[in-house]
Image (tube, rainbow, N blue to C red):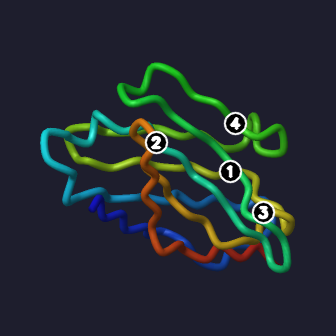
Amino acid sequence: QVQLVESGGGLVQPGGSLRLSCAASRFTYGTTFSSYAMGWYRQPPGKERELVAGISSVGGTTNYADSVKGRFTISRDNAKNTVYLQMNDLQPEDTAVYYCKARRQSNNYWGQGTQVTVSS
């Protein structure tokens, strides 16, 4: 069972920045971190979970929700088994619990989430 631990959330003022990290471990037999596509999702209060950004297993391809394009950047360091989400120009509507997900074939693994609150 892949284990994912998110960190880096917190309270930030509008226009501020945060960088989230997701450290992965306990990969299934025969796989490494680079075997998994990674994604960041978020769940605002009272709403459904939504995709924020995704990155392919070797990092060559990324995709973003329209609402975060130009403000958020997803990246990964396969040597450190970590995926990052750099969030700039944060706005109150970015307030949510942010989750990391690892995907390989039909298997998905989720972290516990980290709270991001954007408020003055």
Q: Which mark is residue 94?
A: 3
Residue at the far top: name it: 60
Spatial CA distance of label 1 from label 3 is 11 Å
Which SS class for mark 2? loop
Q: Amino acid at mark 4?
A: Tyr
Q: Residues at badges 3 and 4 in contact (C-beta under 8 Å)?
A: no
Which SS class for mark 1? loop
Sooner in the amino-acid sequence: mark 2 or mark 3: 3
Q: Read off the residue under disc 1.
A: 88
Q: Position of residue 63 (x, y in %)?
A: 64, 31
User: In the picture, residue 3 is in which quadrant?
Assistant: bottom left
Sooner in the amino-acid sequence: mark 1 or mark 2: 1
Spatial CA distance of label 3 from label 4 is 14 Å
Q: Amino acid at mark 1?
A: Asn
Sooner in the amino-acid sequence: mark 3 or mark 4: 4
Q: Which mark is residue 64?
A: 4
Q: Residues at badges 1 and 3 in contact (C-beta under 8 Å)?
A: no
Q: Amino acid at mark 3?
A: Asp
Residue at 86% over, 65% down: 93
Which SS class for mark 4? strand
Q: Which mark is residue 106?
A: 2
Q: Residues within 10 Å of mark 2 (few under 14, many from 20)?
A: few
Tell me: residue 100, above or below residue 85: below
